[in-house]
Structure formats: C-alpha cells, structure tokens
Amino acid sequence: MKKQEVKGMNNSKKLMGMPVVSLADGQQLGQVKGLIIHPAKMSIVALLMERQGWFKEQPVIPYQHVKNVGQHVVTVDHPQAMAKLSSFPELEALAKNPLPLLKNRVITEEGALLGTVDDFYFDPQSGRLLSLEIRKGIFWGKTSLPTEKILTWGKDALIVQAHAEIPPEESPSLWVQFRSYWPFGKKAKEKG
C-alpha cells in the first residue's frame, strides 16, 4: 500500500493552495499559503493564509480551529478562526524564525547523509507530523522516516537515529529502472 493511500494521513505538498472553508457559514476564507511548524512539538501549529489586498497583515489560522483536511478542502469551525499573525506572539516568533524542514539535509547520528526532506505526512486531525519523505537524489528514489527517529532539528540539518529510514517505497528509482535495461541488465538478457 502506498503512503498516500493510508487513511488518516495527508502530505504537506497537497495542502498548499487548498481552499479553507468555515463550517459555520460555508464561507471560503482563502487558500493555504504556508505552514507554521513547531519543531519541539513536531506539529503544524498554524496555517498561513494568502494575503488579501495590499499592505495587509499576514492572516493565520491556528491549527486548533482546523476540523479536517479533506481531499479538496480544509474545514475550520468558524470564520473568526482566521486572525492576524500578530495576535499570536508564539506563532509570530515561529513564523519569523522558522527552522527549515523541506529541502533540509537528513544526517544520521553516525554521520551518514540519508538525503533531503522532500515532503512530510501529518495527522489531519491534530497536525502532528508522522513521517518524512526523504529523497536520496534523482536516481536513488525516496525513503520514509518516522518522525520519532528525529533526534535534533537544526537550521542546517535534521539529525536522526542510526538506521532510522524505512526501505525505499514500492516504485523503483530511475536508477534501478535504467540499470535493468542496461545492455547487461536482467531485462536485456531476457530479450537476447
């Protein structure tokens, strides 16, 4: 079973650009522009919304107001869930000094580079990060890393436990596919 099919998990890339609708009155509040993640809590704590008009302050929806992240729409309890970022000092501090997650390097405590974070999966009800999708490079595919294996989340790298990654997903990497068709590969021998 592919990770995207696992019930109760969403990925961060899918969330970007999603419309946000209030359950109280059916009003669309805008679209998700970004996420505020609390590194110590390993959780999404707020949705950054698109700005409306010129010189407006950054609107934000604290994650406690999110009722669900569906396939097409994020639902929140009421339209007042969206407020100015400056109304929430803790969120504002996290937004001004975020620790990078996407494209951040992942290194084991033994010093092995596993790759870079390409995406992450989270629980749509709580916002808790569940796993990271690690890209090993164009030709090497992706692996999954449970967030419990993260020891340190830093500005330049995520440090994880030794042997923390899950083996590559079911789909083979481009390198594996290429290698199988190389003149001496298994498929080439079957043809010849």
Image (cartoon, rainbow, N blue to C red):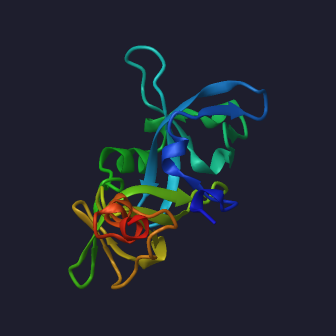
Q: Residue furthest right?
A: 24
32 shown above or below 137:
above
- State the residue in front, 176 or 45: 176
Residue 75 on image: x %, y %: 69, 39
- State the residue in front, 119 or 126: 119
16 shown above or below 45:
above
Residue 137 on image: x %, y %: 28, 59
Left of 121 or right of it: where is 116?
left
What residue appears at the point 30 percent right and 59 percent down from the top-left corner? 139
- State the residue in front, 131 or 42: 131
What residue appears at the point 56 percent right and 62 percent down from the top-left corner? 128
- State the residue in front, 15 or 61: 15
| Badge count | 0
Figure quadrant of the N terminus:
bottom right
Left of 21 or right of it: where is 154?
left
Q: Residue furthest front?
A: 192
Figure quadrant of the C terminus:
bottom left
Left of 160 or right of it: where is 51?
right
Q: Quadrant of residue 162?
A: bottom left
Residue 152 on image: x %, y %: 32, 73
Residue 33 on image: x %, y %: 46, 34
What residue appears at the point 53 percent right and 59 percent down from the top-left corner? 121
Q: Quadrant of residue 5?
A: bottom right
106 shown above or below 23:
below
Left of 169 or right of it: where is 182?
left
Q: Residue furthest top?
A: 54
